[in-house]
Image (cartoon, rainbow, N blue to C red):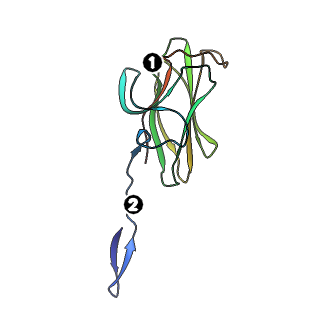
Amino acid sequence: MATSEAPGNTIKPSIESKSTAVYLSDLQSVEGEAKAGESKANAKTYKNSIILGYNDCSEDFQVGYNLDRKYRHLQATISPADTTRSGIGIRFMAFLDGKNIADHDLVVGQAKRLDVDVEGGLRLVLLSRIHKVGSDYQTCPSDGDRAVWGDAQIS
């Protein structure tokens, strides 16, 4: 906290507006399960990723984080991992306090840059759903099918 001098030599605190980005991979999740670390998607390596993996026939894979109402933006590059099978689509969704704030459907070789407002939010949930391209129904994934939230960070 900085101070500023007002007339009459009274010192008043002033709030510094500093926005420091924090990688989600450095935070402890409060619900769900994800791998945090390096992943390759759309021929690019993301060192600080959230990776939602597929190794069973679960319908959705999700992970949640408490934001403590102190962040304004979620930024990430979303893409299926380069190991994802052709013919498989992954739907990427982000929810803030239960409200859908991002929803994109991608296949291997596609990527989308996200910059979404999370101001005032308490709980951020990242959710990914695998499906066959051209269909909404679930398919059993293979070990290589992964949803990459590349360099996901909040600021």
Task: Where is residue 106? Give x, y as percent.
Answer: 53, 23
Q: Residue furthest right?
A: 137
- From the viewer's perspective, is residue 123 above or below residue 148? below
- From the viewer's perspective, is residue 133 above or below residue 59? above
- From the viewer's perspective, is residue 146 above or below residue 94? above
Read off the residue under disc 2: 17
Foreground residue among 96 and 102: 96
Tag 2, which secondary structure? loop
Q: CA distance from mark 2 to mark 1?
A: 38 Å
**Residue neighbourhood size for the residue with mark 2, other residues' Cα within 10 Å, grouped as few (<14), some (14–19), many (≥20):** few
Query: Label 2 amino acid?
Result: Ser
Q: Are marks 2 and 1 in contact (CB under 8 Å)?
A: no
Q: Position of 135 compared to 20: left or right?
A: right
Mark on residue 76?
A: none
Q: Which residue is located at x 59 percent, y 15 percent?
A: 133
Task: Where is residue 138? Give x, y as percent.
Answer: 65, 19
Query: Label 1 amino acid?
Result: Gly
Q: Which residue is located at x 52 percent, y 53 percent?
A: 68
- From the viewer's perspective, is residue 147 above or below residue 72? above
Q: Which residue is located at x 55 percent, y 23 percent?
A: 90
Task: Where is residue 42? Give x, y as percent.
Answer: 41, 21
Q: Which residue is located at x 42 percent, y 38 percent?
A: 25
> Tag 1 or tag 2, which sits nearer the N-term?
2
Read off the residue under disc 1: 109
**Residue neighbourhood size for the residue with mark 1, other residues' Cα within 10 Å, grouped as few (<14), some (14–19), many (≥20):** some
Q: Position of 139 compared to 53: left or right?
A: right
